[in-house]
């Protein structure tokens, strides 16, 4: 039986930072951008521990599983090995689900975005 790698020690700090970012999200585009930034941080930690460089990205997607691994990243054997032998897909999935919830909230309630637009227009006049 092969050993399953665990990266949950990186999930909590990243999730905490992600919650703060999601609170600050003013639009669906912010949600996508912040999700990408959190994935960058998470992958940096994971690949640094594994002694490997990081390549490309994992981006937010509107359809389940709510994230998309870039083709360039999937093409790297180093990534595939970690992805298939660790809890990384579970961690990414949990964060993607949170991003999706915030995305849907921003889509249904764009008041924060509109308030910022109106405020910026008032400042410009």
Image (cartoon, helix red, strand yellow):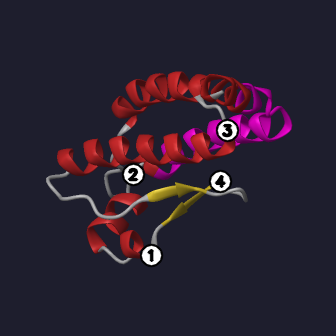
The answer to whether marks 4 and 1 mark residues whose Cβ atoms lie closer than 8 Å is no
Asked whether, in this view, residue 12 is left or right of residue 114, the answer is: left
Residue placed most toward the observer, 41 or 64: 41
- Residue 34 is situated, as x and y percent measured from the top left of the image, at 50, 40
The residue furthest right is 108
The alpha-carbon separation of the residues under discs 4 and 1 comes to 16 Å
The alpha-carbon separation of the residues under discs 1 and 2 comes to 19 Å
Pointer 1 or 2: first along the chain: 1
Pointer 4 or 3: first along the chain: 3
Which residue corresponds to mark 4?
66
Label 2 Cα neighbours within 10 Å, binned few <14 / some 14-19 / many ≥20: some
The alpha-carbon separation of the residues under discs 2 and 4 comes to 19 Å
The answer to whether marks 4 and 3 mark residues whose Cβ atoms lie closer than 8 Å is no
> Is 90 placed above or below 78 here?
above
- Residue 99 is situated, as x and y percent measured from the top left of the image, at 63, 40
Which residue corresponds to mark 2?
86
The alpha-carbon separation of the residues under discs 1 and 3 comes to 27 Å
- Residue 70 is situated, as x and y percent measured from the top left of the image, at 46, 69
The alpha-carbon separation of the residues under discs 4 and 3 comes to 17 Å
Q: Is residue 110 magenta?
A: yes
Stretch of the chain drawn in magenta: 89-115
Asked whether, in this view, residue 47 is left or right of residue 124, the answer is: left
Pointer 4 or 1: first along the chain: 4
At x 44%, y 25%, the residue is 17
Which numbered mark, 1 or 3, is in the foreground of this view?
3
The mark found on residue 71 in the picture is: 1
The answer to whether marks 1 and 2 mark residues whose Cβ atoms lie closer than 8 Å is no
């Amino acid at each position: 039986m092969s050993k399953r790698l665990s990266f949950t020690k990186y999930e909590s700090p990243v999730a905490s930072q992600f919650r703060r970012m999601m609170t600050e999200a003013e639009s669906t585009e912010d949600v996508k951008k912040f999700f990408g930034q959190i994935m960058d941080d998470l992958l940096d930690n994971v690949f640094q521990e594994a002694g490997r460089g990081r390549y490309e990205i994992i981006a937010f997607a509107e359809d389940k599983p709510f994230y998309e691994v870039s083709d360039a990243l999937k093409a790297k054997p180093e990534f595939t090995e970690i992805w298939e032998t660790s809890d990384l897909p579970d961690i990414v999935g949990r964060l993607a689900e949170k991003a999706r919830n915030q995305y849907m909230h921003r889509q249904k309630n764009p008041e924060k975005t509109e308030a910022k637009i109106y405020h910026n227009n008032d400042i410009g006049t």
